[in-house]
Amino acid sequence: MQLTMLGVGSSAGTPVVGCNCATCLSDNPRNKRTRCSSLITLDSGENILIDTGPDLRNQSLRENVKRVDAVLYTHTHADHLHGIDDLRAFCVIQRSQIPLYAKEDAVLHIAQKFGYTLRDPSDFWEMPVLRVETIDAPFELFGMTVSPIPVMHGRSQIFGYRIGNIAYMTDVSEIPESSFPLLEGLDILLLDCLREKSHPTHINIEQSISYIGRIKAKQSYLIHMTHELEYASLSKKLPKDVFVGFDGLKLSVN
C-alpha cells in the first residue's frame, strides 16, 4: 500500500496570496503547499482519495493520478470539499460511478450543495457521476477495513481515517479518549499541525507532538500547515521519527 501526500497546506495554501514572509518567498519546493489531501493506492491497484480540495486537478496532474475509485471525506469545509467537480475527469476515464463515504451531516451537506454530482450512470459522462454512502463504523472497501476515527474540529465532530496501519487526521482540535484505541499499533500517522500559536479549531506544534508521543506510531508526519511553519526550521525542532510532510511525499506500508 502506498500513501501519496497530494497536499499538506492549510486553507490558504502556501505561498499565501500577497504574502512576503520567508516561507512564502522560499525557493524550497517543500514550502509549496497545496490544500490538504492524500491518496491511498492499494496493492490491488485501487485509489482511495481522502478529501477533494480545490487543488485536486493540479495535484492529480502533478502526481499523474489517472483513476479514483472511492473518496473518504473528513468534513465539508471548502478546502476539503470544493474540488469535488474535478472528479468528473476520473468518471470520464473510468466510465464508472465513484462512491463517496462520509458522516451523515457531511453527506447531507454534499447533497445540498453539490447535488448535481449525485447521478446514476448513463451515456453522459461530462459531469461527475457520484453516489454518497453514510458511514459511522468500520467498513470494508476493496478488501481493506476502513475505520472512521471521531475527532473534534472546534465544536464539530469530524472523521479521521485508519486504513490498515495508516491513520490520517486533519483539522483536529482534540482527539477524544474513545478514539485512542483505534490508533494503536500504527506504522504511519498523518496529523494536523496548523502553526506554532494555539488555535481554536486546530492543534498547534506543541499539541501535535504531545498527541504523537501518546499514539506512538512508528513514523509520524505533520500536515495541514500554514505558511508560519517553514520546512527546514520546523524539521530541526522535531523528535525522532516525527517528520514534516510535503506535497508529493510517498510512503509505502506493508
Image: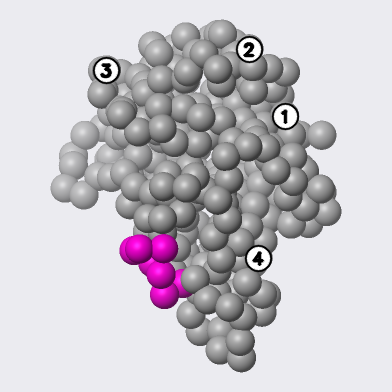
View extreme (bottom): residue: 123
Q: Position of residue 69 (x, y in %)?
A: 67, 61
Residue occupying the point 66% across, 27% down? 188
Question: Which one is in front, 78 or 225?
Answer: 78
Quadrant of residue 124 within the rendered picture? bottom right
Work out how far the residue at label 4 is from the one at label 2, CA to CA, in angstroms.
Answer: 33 Å
For mark 2, what is the residue?
216
Residue occupying the point 26% across, 18% down? 197
The secondary structure type at the circle numbered 3 is loop
Say whether residue 64 is visible: no
Question: Which one is in front, 14 or 158?
Answer: 158
The N terminus, quarter of image? top right
Quadrant of residue 144 within the rendered picture? top right
Circle 1 Cα neighbour tier, 10 Å, few/some/many (<14 / 14–19 / ≥20): some
Region in magenta: 111-117
For mark 3, what is the residue?
198
